[in-house]
Image (tube, rainbow, N blue to C red):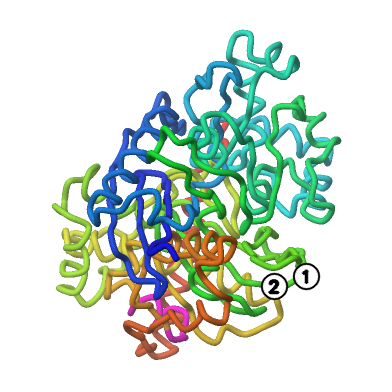
Amino acid sequence: MQKYIMALDQGTTSSRCIIFDQAGNICSKAQKEFKQIYPKPGWVEHNPVEIWSSQLSVAIEAMAGIGATYQDISGIGITNQRETTILWDKETGEPIYHAIVWQCRRTAKMIDELKKDGFDRTIREKTGLIPDAYFSASKIAWILEHVEGAREKAEAGKLAFGTVDTWLIWNLTKGGVHVTDYTNASRTMLFDIHKLCWDDEICERFRIPKCILPEVMPSSHLYGYTHESVFGGKIAIAGAAGDQQAALFGQCCFEKGQVKNTYGTGCFLLMNTGTEAIKSQNGLLTTIAASSGGSVEYALEGSVFVAGAAIQWLRDGMRIIKSAEVSDEYAKRVEDTKGVYIVPAFAGMGAPYWDPYARGTIVGITRGFEKEHFIRATLESIAYQTRDVIASMQEDAKVGLQDLKVDGGASANDFLMQFQADIIGQSVRRPTCIETTALGAAYLAGLATGFFESKEAIKENWQLSKQFCPQMDETQRVALLKGWRRAVRAALAWAEDDED
């Protein structure tokens, strides 16, 4: 029996590799940040070659950290930033353009055109998604339209499209496997989540040849093996899931109605809805959940575009904190925000508002507003946005929230977690291992290779680190939420076209 399972966690700002044992303990990890490219306001790109090279280097580093060889690794699970779009030449393996990142808003007007003739309803029915520039379809269309010779090559079957999982598997197998999983396919806005296939009508509308699309498989599945030249021998690639579905699985939310929130670059709240694909009436997405059994399971999802990225902005953009960790300390130095609200709509607003033109807004500033209040207001904005999504989710699913399982980098912030519990009026539970995105990918791969015996065995690995119980009285909560709603209205009003 091999000793370890490997998770490749390819995120928006960094590539990571975490190696786990059978108890779900982290045995080794390595991380490397890579360049964010902003060609124009609202545009976000990555270099696909840098994504691959950074991911490979951290995998080798993590293995070296514990002296592991390919023979010690039972399998590889991949989890990735979703919707980010890469097109490459099938013969050379070279990308034909930078990766267009999920945050990129360049195709917002293309989406507006869809809505004019009602095609947005077709997309909603088939894909479970609210048409938005966030998803892959319009990004693929943009590349095919703007890169010289791309459309001709695509129609001739000479190009391959992939989300980041597909790009990594292609490179790990040296072009031997062109595949994605159900969760990533469900985020492209091209995949019928009910029939489980690429949709002809939608592909035709976006003028995307189906021959460039990958084969779609379950999340826990043996996709193939790494080429011997990558790690010195073959390792099974046996799991793949978009980062948020991987985190839902890593949090052991296997039962209908269980909810998790990941505080990463964005904030992503998912509820397992079992085998039922619930159609949201409140601006949420219906998506496919990662599962290891024969049947496909679904989830309701609310996406907040800016969460941890707001803390990163305080550090790198505003330069008012030296590290993300100190934001907790600064926020606790003041009792409130002096009535100030920050709406960090740097890339529009996600669920439940879905306004790509909204922009970041700070309201209520008076002379007494200082650095500590600024930091506290930024952290509180993350909790407010999460609360908006939870309220929508409860209404759609017709179930009350029992508690909220949390993970992701910003979940380590005690101030934020306490304020989150206060503003939703429910307990927040943080596990010992908050690396649940990587853990979910490891579980999916381990179930396919036999490294993990069953989901029941996996559940025993989940351990509570800290529980945050609500301490705020209802009057204060209501008043704060009223102020937040006013601030959101201000952010949305800024997006309105003013002819004067």
Q: Position of residue 443 (x, y in %)?
A: 51, 66
- Displayed quadrant of residue 89: top right
Residue depicted at x 78% and y 43%? 120
Is 65 drawn above or below residue 296 in the view shown? above
Do residues under tags 2 and 1 come within 8 Å of each other at their CB atoms? yes
Residue 402 drawn in magenta = no
Query: Which residue matches tag 2?
Result: 273
Q: Position of residue 331 (x, y in %)?
A: 21, 69
Is 75 drawn above or below residue 429 in the view shown? above
Question: Is 273 in front, or is 452?
Answer: 452
Query: Which residue matches tag 1?
Result: 276
Residue 370 falls left or right of residue 197:
left
- Displayed quadrant of residue 397: bottom right
Q: In whole angstroms, how far apart are the C-alphas of marks 2 and 1?
A: 6 Å
Residue 28 in view (yes/no): yes
Residue depicted at x 31% and y 39%? 57
Residue depicted at x 52% and y 63%? 446
Question: Is 472 in front, or is 38?
Answer: 38
Residue 257 falls left or right of residue 38:
right
Q: Quadrant of the C terminus?
A: top right
Judged from the image, the secondary structure of the residue bearing numbered disc 1 is loop
Judged from the image, the secondary structure of the residue bearing numbered disc 2 is strand
Residue 343 in view (yes/no): no
Q: Main secondary structure of the magenta part?
A: helix
Q: Amino acid at mark 2?
A: Thr
Q: Report the span colored magenta.
A: 418-427
Residue 424 drawn in magenta = yes
Q: Amino acid at mark 1?
A: Glu
